[in-house]
Image (tube, rainbow, N blue to C red):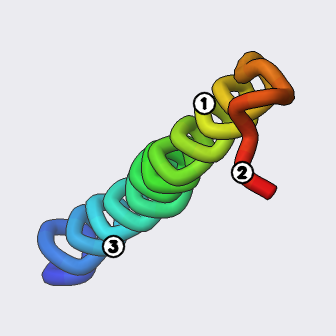
Amino acid sequence: MYSALFVRPVRAGASLVRFLDREVVDTYVRGAGTLPRWLGTAVRRARPATSRPM
């Protein structure tokens, strides 16, 4: 009875938190690091060649 009332719900909650951390938070963090890299590449390509440093 203890297992059904306490252990299983806590384990289910832990599984949910693990899923959210792995899939949602990690995806957001990877995206937050990728976006500036893409923007930097786009700006670099858009600059005229004469204004690029040697």
Q: Which of marks 3 and 1 is nearer the N terminus?
A: 3
Mark 3 lies on residue: 11
Q: Distance between the residues labelled 2 and 3?
A: 56 Å
Residue 54: x and y, percent? 80, 57
Which quarter shows the N terminus? bottom left
Residue 4: x and y, percent? 25, 69
Residue 46 versus residue 53 in the image, above or below: above
Residue nearer the viewer, 19 or 47: 47
Circle nearer the viewer, 2 or 3 = 2
Q: Which of marks 1 and 2 is nearer the N terminus?
A: 1
Asked if marks 2 and 3 touch (Cβ < 8 Å), the reply is: no
Amino acid on which disc 3 is placed = Arg
Residue nearer the viewer, 48 or 38: 48
Mark 1 lies on residue: 39
Specify whether 12 is left or right of 23: left
Q: Which residue occupies 68% across, 35% down? A: 38
Amino acid on which disc 1 is placed = Leu
Say which mark, if any, is on residue 53.
2
Circle nearer the viewer, 1 or 2 = 2
Residue 48 versus residue 13 in the image, above or below: above
Specify whether 45 is left or right of 8: right
Amino acid on which disc 2 is placed = Pro
Q: Which residue occupies 63% across, 45% down? A: 37
| Callout 2 secondary element | loop
